Amino acid sequence: MGVPEVPEAGAFAVDGRDGRVGRVIGLADGDVRLRPPGGGPEWACPADAVRPAPPGVVLRARVTEINREGQLPR
């Protein structure tokens, strides 16, 4: 079995350790940096524990981001 492919920056991914969903920010020290939908603190996840988010999860994450954007002052 090969090394799993890390989703590219900007894609949603799932932290396989605890099921959290985040947008891939980039790579740092062999870890994938993720930020939760709608904002919040980034966290690091080992590259081998990250998997692409399924379509339903991506849809919910995008709705969360859109709702958050609608609440920001203009």
Image: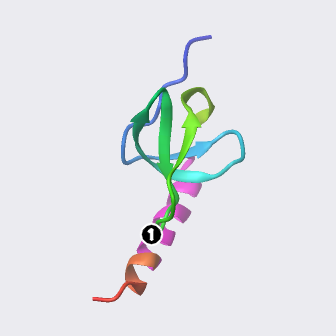
Q: Position of residue 23 (x, y in %)?
A: 46, 51
Q: In the shown orientation, is residue 22 left or right of residue 70? A: right
Check disc 1: other Cα within 10 Å, few if <14, some if 14-19, many if 20+.
Answer: some
- x and y percent of residue 7 in the render? 45, 36
Magenta span has 61? yes
Q: Majority secondary structure of the magenta segment?
A: helix
**Which part of the image, by quadrant, shows the N terminus?**
top right
Res 52 seen here: no
Question: Is residue 29 something one can see in this rendering?
Answer: yes
Q: Residue at x 50, y 53 (%)?
A: 42
Q: Which residue is mark 1?
A: 65
Circle 1 sits in a helix, a strand or a loop, which is it? helix
Tell me which residue sits at (43%, 33%) in the image.
28
Outermost residue, bottom side: 73
Q: Amino acid at mark 1?
A: Glu
Which residue is drawn at the image coordinates 46% and 66% (left, top)?
39
Residue at 46 percent of width and 28 percent of height: 29
Q: Residue 2 in the image: x percent, y percent?
A: 56, 12
- Which residues, given as a range, are shown in magenta? 51-67
Give the mark count.
1
Residue 6: image x %, image y %? Answer: 47, 30
In the rendered view of the protein, which quadrant contains the C terminus? bottom left
